[in-house]
Amino acid sequence: MSQPPHPWWKSATVYQIYPSSFLDANGDGTGDLAGIIAKLDYLKDLGVDVLWLSPIYRSPLADMGYDISDYEDIDSRYGTLEDWDRLLEGAHARGMKLMMDLVVNHTSDEHAWFTASKTSKNDPKRDWYIWRPGKVVDGEELPPNNWKSVFQGSAWERDSATGEYYLHLYVPKQPDLNWDNPVVRSAVWDVMRFWVRRGCDGFRMDVINCISKTDGLPDAPLADHTQYYQPASMYFANGPQVHKYIKQMHAEVLSHHDLITVGETPFTHESSELAAYVLPQNRELNMVFHFELMDIDSPPESPLLSKPWTLRELKAIIGRWQRFMRDDGFWNAVFIENHDHARSVSRFGNDSAQWRAVSAKMLAIFQITQTGTLYVYQGQELGLKNFPRTWEIEEYKDVASQNYWNLIKEQRQQAQGKEDVEMSDLLDSFAQKARDHARTPMQWNASPHGGFTTGTPWMRVNDDYREWNAEQQIGDEASVHAFWKRALKVRKAHDTLIYGDFVMLLETHEQVFAYTRNYGSTSALVLLNFKEGKVEVDLGEVIGGVAGYTFVLGNYENKAIGLGEKVTLKDYEGRVYVREALLN
Ligand code: GLC
């Protein structure tokens, strides 16, 4: 059966680099562009097609570069524009592409646009940000509304120069741009054109579904009785003009180039809300990152806390998105790790010494057998795991961790009327969920600091670097790294894994996730045991015969395992079989 041609970005494997923690070439303790350039062969050899760089623009690093003070320059910690050109050239020379992180819901408060905006109410850039007078209640001045910042406290900051407040959905050093102002939108298109002209191949768009806020900025409903400030995403996520603005971005910039685009769309579990960003006839983005899977183990209070999850919940989420509006052209972004989430082997696998490698490989199979563009986060290919519970709060550098810790500590101090309060339960949660786990330096070899730096690393390297590092794994056929390399090749060799439909088997099974993927005359069968303990499943009941299936990948021994109707999967075992329909 002939299929229409697919755009290149559908079959691409994207590798996310967190530059601060990738490789430090100049010994100042922070990763840099020269470090990335030095590892281009490593990345090519792994089998990735696109590199996505978390922000490297000039920034005071209030939120690790997601607070940009100059969109058209590189922060000196990372290098120069010329280094970036060399990186691009090196990537292109190896047949890889380079994607930038576009952070335009907000800037840094040190961006020239904002420093002008705050000078006076009449400044031409005043309306580039969202300024409002405070509201007076019982003689007391309060922020314009009760919105809570995603990173705690009010989402408004009073500025003494004019006595007005500006909106910041994240920290006060990240003022939100006013996208309702057409001049702001033009300025964003110019930033994008700057990077496209320089040769970048696409954009990951930070919290892009938050750029349009509900008119009148109404107070959020009371959901959290412990404080005045309330979660307000119903008034800033997927707001009234968001599609108009992204369509304009498409018309002005994206439509003129062959780019890869992925929008980060948090605070949204409704698939129908996200469809609009992705469906091709809407001419907006190629795909979005939804967070349904990432939120599976978070209670409503905070993503830094954890709650139990079940395999059935996970299967329901994956099953729904894998099948979602395929005929209409919806396209998924497949990821289980990024810089904002703890390590996948610690969350969805089992990071004990016995099962770490096996379960990390099982999760690799889980990812490479899904339809969508595949994203791998740095260190995932080595099975890197969360750092230990014994690390104290001082090791958590992320502003989200620090602010949440301080908030809870203050609440407890007030409630208990003493300074010294018990916080170990929060450290238990952070040990499972904090963003910091993804941000420890890459573990390149067994030398001090994992070979990441010759200086003092900005963040402590995970304790296990002597045994768990790239040098140790490269060339070891049994390593997680070698497995990822094989797995990415298997995906590339079988279009059915990328484009095929998705049929869930054994839907209610509590331990096994099984599915087929069918494309033209080819079928793939995927069997994943998500738990410790072996399990037998009877395929005879769920697929019409097992004849003709060939083993293509498995996470135990690297040799073919035959398929019978009754299959026994070992602890965390994953297998992939492929069958070509018999032509007659
Ligand atoms: C996105 C980024 C995250 C950042 C936030 C604010 O969610 O991925 O790291 O803190 O936006 O820019």
Image: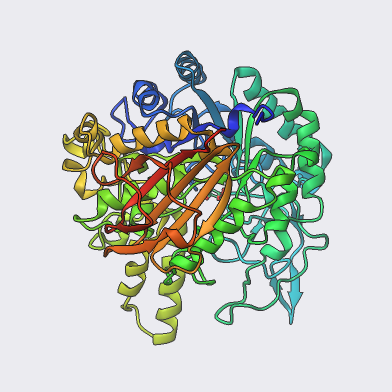
As displayed, is residue 467 above or below residue 92?
A: below
User: Quick check: 41 left or right of 175?
Assistant: left
Quarter containing the C terminus: top right
**Residue 55 pos. (x, y %):** 51, 36
**Residue 39 pos. (x, y %):** 35, 24
Outermost residue to the bottom: 416
User: Quick check: 325 left or right of 405?
Assistant: right
Outermost residue to the front: 584
User: Quick check: 473 left or right of 160?
Assistant: left
Q: Nearer the viewer, residue 255 or 374?
A: 374
Q: Nearer the viewer, residue 382 or 35?
A: 382
User: Quick check: 249 left or right of 552?
Assistant: right
| Figure coloring | rainbow
The quarter holding residue 484 reads: top left
Note whether residue 163 is visible.
no
The quarter holding residue 341 reads: bottom left
Note whether residue 39 is visible.
yes
Q: Residue at x 72, y 51 (%)?
A: 275
Q: Residue at x 71, y 34 (%)?
A: 188
Quarter containing the N terminus: top right
**Residue 214 pos. (x, y %):** 79, 60
**Residue 60 pos. (x, y %):** 50, 40
The quarter holding residue 145 reads: bottom right
Q: Residue at x 72, y 57 (%)?
A: 272
As displayed, is residue 419 above or below residue 40?
A: below
As displayed, is residue 214 above or below residue 519?
A: below
Report how many numbered discs are placed on residues in the image: 0
Q: Nearer the viewer, residue 201 or 198?
A: 201
